[in-house]
Image (cartoon, grey):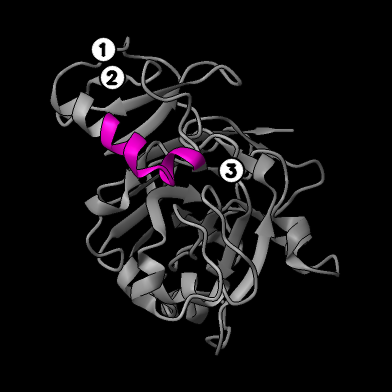
Amino acid sequence: MKLLRVGTPGAERPALLDEDGTTLRDLSGIVTDIDGALLADDAALQRVRTAAAGGELPVLDAGQRVGAPLARAGKVVCIGLNYHDHARETNAQAPSEPIIFFKAADTVVGPDDTVLIPRGSVKTDWEVELAVVIGRTARYLDSQEEALAHVGAYAVSNDVSERAFQLERGGQWDKGKNCETFNPLGPWLVTSDEVPDPQALAMRLSVNGETKQDGTTADMIFPVAEIVRYVSQFMTLYPGDVINTGTPAGVAMGRPEPKPYLRAGDVVELEIEGLGTQRQQLKDA
């Protein structure tokens, strides 16, 4: 299923994208929202499937704003330098264990919402990423197979970053990752049963119509199953927690000088195979 939330910020309603790929169906009569509690509730998910199959769901008007597909995201755990080609382009050694940092949940915005360039920024960068949304509480998982069973859904994520804040201002990466609007998510949550192999997804990103990233999740250093297993050794993962799993080559930081960092007016478009597309225009904060 493709689950999403539509409407004005703060007043989104739960919806489902029909199998035709264009019709939106209203889920508000069946579920209160698209959140971790829903992903963890097999009976509720089955009610949605049954209603969708029976043609019982009302049609929603097209053209509404699509919000972040996950209400009340929990932790946003991020994995750095997780693609072989991205490590090479930044002249970094491939890590021996996953690099973990965090984004605050309030960085999560809708897939087509405006992205704000922070005040004082000179190095705002893009990163198309596969987002994993946890569907079952995970702690000390023993195997990669067990880890995949705890994944509730997948989505497109843009791990927007300010490189000077991240790398040149001392301290940890977090200050270059947590600026307002720095994690567009969606347009949908695609339930894990519809993604048989998360390591076989094409992913692309363009800026002002020019392709910048053209990669595949097959190039991950640590695959999704290992990431979930590994992270569960250090923290409990709850339904509604999000893991951004890294980005392929093609970020501005990896380009020759003058590096084409984002400026107000730029338009970023990104997609992952089967998971939908995003489009953001950049504005100054």
Asked where in the image residue 225 lies, by quadrant, the reply is bottom left
**Magenta span:** 37-47
**Which disc is residue 73 wearing?**
3
Mark with earlier residue (1, 3): 1
Label 3: which secondary element: loop
- Residue 211 visible? The answer is no
Disc 2 + disc 1, Cβ < 8 Å: yes
Tag 2: residue type?
A: Arg
- Residue located beneath label 2 in the image: 25
Mark with earlier residue (2, 3): 2
Tag 1: residue type?
A: Val
Left-right relation of 56 to 206: left
- Decide which of 115, 183 is in the foreground and name it: 183
Where is the C terminus found, in terms of image quarters?
top right
**Which disc is residue 59 wearing?**
1
Mark with earlier residue (2, 1): 2
Q: Callout 2: 10 Å neighbours few (<14), some, many (20+)? A: many
Image x and y of residue 249, in percent: 44, 68
Q: Callout 1: 10 Å neighbours few (<14), some, many (20+)? A: some
Magenta stretch: includes residue 42 = yes
Picture residue at 75% right of the left edge, 42% below the top:
118
Image x and y of residue 71, in percent: 54, 34
Main SS class of the magenta portion in the image: helix
Image x and y of residue 264, in percent: 63, 35
